[in-house]
Image (cartoon, coloured by chain):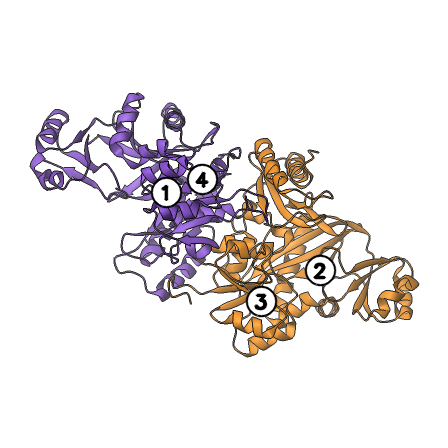
Chain colours: A purple, B orange
Amino acid sequence: MDARTGLPVVGMVGAGQLARMTHQAAIPLGQSLRILADSAEDGAAVVASDVLVGDYRSLEDLRAFAVGCDVVTWDHEHVPNEHIAALEAEGVVVRPGPAALRFAQDKAQMRRRLTELGVPCPRWAPIATVEALASFGDEVGWPVIVKAARGGYDGKGVWVIAAAEDATELLESGTGLIVEEKVALARELAADVARSPWGQGAVWPVVETVQQDGICVEVIAPAPELDDELAEQAQELALRIADELGVVGVLAVELFETTDGRLLVNELAMRPHNSAHWTIEGSRTSQFEQHLRAVLDYPLGSTEQTAPVVVMANLLGGPDGVTPKGIDERVHHCFAHWPDVKVHLYGKGFRPGRKVGHVTALGHDLSEVRARARAAADYLSNGDQS
Amino acid sequence: MDARTGLPVVGMVGAGQLARMTHQAAIPLGQSLRILADSAEDGAAVVASDVLVGDYRSLEDLRAFAVGCDVVTWDHEHVPNEHIAALEAEGVVVRPGPAALRFAQDKAQMRRRLTELGVPCPRWAPIATVEALASFGDEVGWPVIVKAARGGYDGKGVWVIAAAEDATELLESGTGLIVEEKVALARELAADVARSPWGQGAVWPVVETVQQDGICVEVIAPAPELDDELAEQAQELALRIADELGVVGVLAVELFETTDGRLLVNELAMRPHNSAHWTIEGSRTSQFEQHLRAVLDYPLGSTEQTAPVVVMANLLGGPDGVTPKGIDERVHHCFAHWPDVKVHLYGKGFRPGRKVGHVTALGHDLSEVRARARAAADYLSNGDQS
């Protein structure tokens, strides 16, 4: 409890853009997010007052951070599950908790549990040997997708394998791996929901996510021309997963829509997620506010869309990098060209391929809104106007 | 220049709710607002990282604060104009600058200048003696409104005077005073604009402001049933004043709409203003983002309204105060009742009559939206549901 405001204190472990945008959403709630940062220079650490610098892999640092927090939540999945469990055992309120989080931290556990629950997934298997991989690939067809069970993100820890021998080195590295069939993909979707501790659920419209080299570059809300029944099915699936796994906070369910019209779960994330950045301007309640409402055990907010079409495009650092002078000039030109595109910069250096910000455009006409978001993002990323 | 981000640094003197909400708007622009606070416990100081505690009345403190700022702006009008002029003379970029700010700091200078510009104002005069007051009142009719030329806000520094003798003590106090006719008021309006250093102007829809005991309690955007011609006249007036006075940043022009259909200027504020808090959710560009864009010399953003009707209602501390436990419970109930009302808490204690937050409701039907905003604000202020 913050004695000054009379409000509970939320701590977030991790100080990347998700914590940065969560802090932004915390301000109107009368909150000031308490943040555990790797460095005082992290994107969220430079905009918040209550920052502890420490190591999220250290139980001692986590314990020190938890003192004074009424609830602790997460900006990423990399905090060791056993540490989260230890905090919980010591009486710290952790949301989401370790029992839910392990399904976002370990793909083998996630696939096993979802399969038990009858949730449609790509065919998959845990693998440890070239023989097992060969037998799986021969059964479902080559190529297959090999994934690190832990620690992957943004296309990292994912390999397309055309023949079992190609994975020999990977299999010998000792990394825990799973293999999945390469599904016949029409497109990728995401169903984002939030769940409160007592089980209230809220769901945003299903979105289409556009990936490039395994990185999300664009999100369209709602997913264009998505069959109503399939949209409802995706939303119900996401709410059911949140409930069955006991998630508290935002749950992003990344989905494959297959060429034969099925939905398969790709990944789960139990935190604010790139697929819902559009909600900052595009929904009555942003995912960041909703995550805070959920972990604070407040009733959830309306997920009504504020415009018929909302498109979010990520800014990725360009191959040339950006000089300090460069980005300020780009912002000038961007604002001059697109006075109604909303810009979000994460306070990070523009390393090539790195997510350094995003833009959001709203309107009525899909192709117009999409072109506007794309052009603004390309211009900010590269200084080119496409 | 922030070497880490390559973006210019904005400093704001003052750490109240305006600075708090400006910092919130600074985050997506890649900024972290640098703040000069009276105390480390101020509403803005507790949510920002780059905070200096100091005295805005001390030129030394202002100088120390300005080091490392590319531009300095203001959360209130109380910084001595001569200090602002001294900073400017020393090469600090101050926006708005001293030449404009004096018209927001001194009502006598404001009335004189606006009168020169042919801007419609209530009849007025500077007064120093009971005789001068008597003669003014006899001419325009009693009662009259006496105002402190400097330092008033939220109804403070304003007196309704029925007879010249009633102001004897006030006149002898040495406070600089002006007197104005009491106009036949239909209602109060505000025309809020922003102006950039090179003269770009942007204007929001004209709003109706509802006052209670001299404090703004409600703002309706756009002003209901306002004659189109009068609305345009108000907008043009505000843009012209911004231009003539050389304002940079947000300018709020408070207006009287008289019973005979005229517009008269009441007050000017050269900073984000209570009459435009509705823009956070209700306009494509909030006044806080727009103020930053203006002082950063970025092109201004779209002022398009995001819903046909937007109502902002202030939260005022109730007569009983609020125990720490009280406010958290009220937020719970408020969110449960009104899942689409947006709540803004300023991180302040709930002293009676103090502005401690606001709520915003959006929709299509004026009376429904207004009732929703009013009920949520009353509930959060008092724990009563009206």
Residue A112: horizontal and vertical position, in percent? Answer: 26, 26
User: Which mark lies nearer to you, 1 or 3?
Assistant: 3
Q: Amino acid at mark 3?
A: Gly
Q: Residue B59 location, x and y as percent? A: 60, 74
What residue is disc 1 on?
Answer: A274
**Alpha-carbon neighbours of circle 1 within 10 Å: few (<14), some, or many (≥20)?**
many
Tell me the kind of residue under disc 1: Asn
| Inter-mark Cα distance, 2 to 4 | 39 Å
Distance from Cα at disc 1 to Cα at disc 3: 40 Å
Q: Residues within 10 Å of mark 4 (few under 14, many from 20)?
A: many
**Chain holding disc 1:** A
Q: Label 3 belongs to which residue? A: B54
Q: Residues within 10 Å of mark 3 (few under 14, many from 20)?
A: many
Tags 4 and 1 touching, CB below 8 Å = no
| Frontmost residue, B370 versus B83 | B83
Of residues A114 and A53, the one nearer the viewer is A53
Label 4 sits on a secondary structure element that is helix
Residue at image point 68% right, 67% down? B105
Q: CA distance from mark 2 to mark 3?
A: 29 Å
What residue did someone put label 4 on? A287
Q: Nearer the viewer, mark 1 or mark 2?
A: 1
